[in-house]
Image (tube, rainbow, N blue to C red):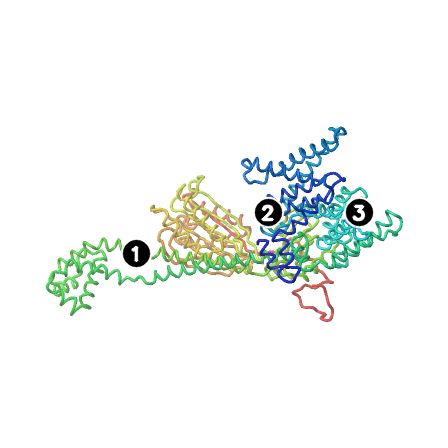
Amino acid sequence: MSGEAVLGQVFEKGMAGKMAFILLDRGWILVPAGFLFGRALLLSQLSPFALSFFAAVLMMKKEVGPRVFLAVLAGALTVSTVQAAVVFSLLFGFLLMHRLFRTLHKGETAPVPFFVFFTTIVVKSVFSYIVNGSAFVPAYDLVLAAIEASLAFVLTLIFMQCMPFLSLSGRIRTLKTEEWISLLIVFASAATGMAGWMIGSLEVDHIAARYLVTAISFLSGAAFGSAAGVVSGLILSLAGVNDFHEMSILAFAGLLGGLFKEWKRSGAIAGLMTATVLAGFYGEGNVTDMAALYESAAAAVLLCLTPKLWTDHLSKLIPGTAEHSIEQQRYLRKVRDVTANRMEQFSDLFDALSGSFAQSVQQETAEREVDLFLSGITEKTCQTCFKKEQCWAYQFNETYELMKNILEDADSGQEVLSPHLAKELEQYCFRPARVEAEIRSQLTYYRANKKLKQQMKESRKIVAEQLEGMSKVMRDFAEEMKREEETHITQEEKITTAIESFGMEITDIRVFSVQKGGVDIEMTVPYSKGHGESEKIIAPILSDLLNEYIIVVDEQQDGSGVRSIFRSATAFRVVTGLAHTAKGGGLISGDSFSAIEIGTGKFAIAISDGMGNGGRAHDESSATIRLLKQILQSGIEETVAVKSINSILSLRTNDEVFSTLDLAIIDLQDARTVFLKVGSAPSFIKRGDQVLKVEAGNVPIGILQQFEVETVHEQLKSGDLLITMSDGVFEGPEFIENADVWMKRKIKSIDTTDPQAFADLLMDEVIRTQSNEIKDDMTLCVARIEHNVPEWAAIPIYDIEPAEKKKKKPDRRRAV
């Protein structure tokens, strides 16, 4: 957001707001600043501020340059005519050098500090020689000129960095720490330009410096306040040796004012007055110097007169303040809402495209294809027939039905028409042989066109389903983004109290969700030599507080400790075992396997068997598994995922290379399982002494471009064994009449419940039936479903009840 827009929103109310808008946006604030920098001196003879400030203004806000030029000269003239001559020479020399070398820098700001450096060292050396005459000492005067030129070089960089903020040119954003320090240097340097100004017995530069430090401590806290005090005190002490004691007052005032920040302005003022009194005791042994107290009181009055609108706006730009955090959260919330709305727009677009494709599929009918074909036949046969009007005008329905029956009979593959159709055609048509010959000659084109139209129809349907799936994924993502990050202050306090009751300390905690089954908590735990405090102590405490098992999903070490992420544990877990072998004991198998968590509290087991054996079959099956993993992890529904894989694999090659897919998706919260079997062997569920068979009739992937996926739903239980296998295992046993009965008997006879041992024993039984020969690729996966019991049990907390539990004593208030 531009500076003008910010002021238009923030400073539009009241006279103070309008004045700030004029001073900052129109650049008039730079004129009095230039006057002060023209007066500012270090060690009573160094003036690095005037040229540095003018150069920065000329580069960053050129239209204000003439006004600042005159203001700087006017400020120098109030010091002395010699100082005015020196400043004029510096400004004129810089303009001359900038003009001479403009073809080299071409408007860039990088060479400007070097121009300032060389101009300062040349002009100051010449003036020292002219003023001192015979008293000119090169070893002293030239070094002093070099020091002043170096300070001017650094100050030019600082002024150019702060100029966008002072003139509101560009986007107003949160300032970094080094940028705030640069601004402090600018403000403190401007305060040195007030040196020598008196209001009665009060020094104006002291009042300005104390007001600056007190305001910053009030806005930002102890860190920035003490830094402002040190910087301001150091610059004032360089401007006048007698002001060295100001550093102690300002630094202590900034520290105390920041510590008393919770008391708002009164706290900052109390810190300033306390620092003034203590500094008086330290310097003089008493507080008889009332001028210092009056100067602090004047600074306090200025702080009270500062409009709240200004302080609220400035506090948003200071990192670490509450206002800055609120502003950042508001900005992030706005970005999140904009992104979510854009995702919803994309979702609506995909919905519209999906509906368009689905509508075009529904509109196309087989009758229209028949009409187009018959119109072409009649154009070549009936157009010149004398019975055309009788057949197609007076007996249209009978003629159309006869031609349609002839087309269907010829399309069935018979070389001659059926007797009753041939007889009917001869009785009805004057040219029966010609009509039949024309239908048969055009039949090849009809079939090709019909097949092409069907493929296009199926392709559009596939695209419609995929667009609908993408729309659903985007809409779900948008809804997830729109979920407001609730502030669980009471839960944070309760968790902190419970953990601290065990003698542990946590430095930061953030509760994102305490929803049942969706707990999400992050906290920083001081690192303690890797003893696993998060897993062994904190997670069990959270399990008791939230009345569900909580586990540690990630730990990352940073400078302040270990950042641990706690989330809800799933109700079930899956332990898998795999037995895998290639045909003839080879190295490359046509089968591929994968067992993954797809990120939504579900576990997927997939086996794909490529047609045949060897590398080509392996490529097809591995491509199926790879695409399946990527699509499922993106959040697309499993049926749409299988159809998408089928369309991709069927369209990418003309070779007849197919693959099967056996997919089981287990919900880890309730153990509900969805089976999608595409040309694959049946699966088996062993539950105690029972063996259940799971099968479905779907053609392999890649044969048809469009097919409906049949799903089978089963409810698994803890202790169940799920056995999935490729056809090499199921059809492998030789001399077995009923493979189902044999496989069930073998599964029932194996006593072990270890998935890996079970898979090895069953594979060994199959190989034995083949005379110890491996005649096909074989893959066997065994998965055991069991309750997920964390390694560490919940630790009961007796003095703090969980938020979800019903309180036994309603009249007693507890920390939640």
Q: Which residue is mark 3?
A: 246
| Residue extending farthest bottom | 811
Image quarter (top left, top right, bottom left or bottom right) of the C terminus:
bottom right
Q: Does the rendering let one see residue 273?
A: yes
Q: What residue do we see at 72% from left, 32% from top?
A: 130
Label 3 Cα neighbours within 10 Å, binned few <14 / some 14-19 / many ≥20? many
CA gap, disc 3 and disc 2: 34 Å
Mark 3 element type: helix
- Viewed as shown, does residue 405 lie left or right of 343? left
Q: Amino acid at mark 2?
A: Lys
Q: Amino acid at mark 1?
A: Lys
Label 3 vs 2, first from the N-terminus: 2
Q: Amino acid at mark 3?
A: Glu
Q: Nearer the viewer, residue 286 or 67?
A: 67
Q: What residue do we see at 73% from left, 62% from top?
A: 798
Q: Which mark is residue 61?
A: 2
Label 1 vs 2, first from the N-terminus: 2
- Closest to the camera, between mark 3 and mark 2, is 2
Label 3 vs 1, first from the N-terminus: 3
Label 2 Cα neighbours within 10 Å, binned few <14 / some 14-19 / many ≥20? some
CA gap, disc 3 and disc 1: 90 Å
Q: Which residue is mark 1?
A: 453
Mark 1 element type: helix
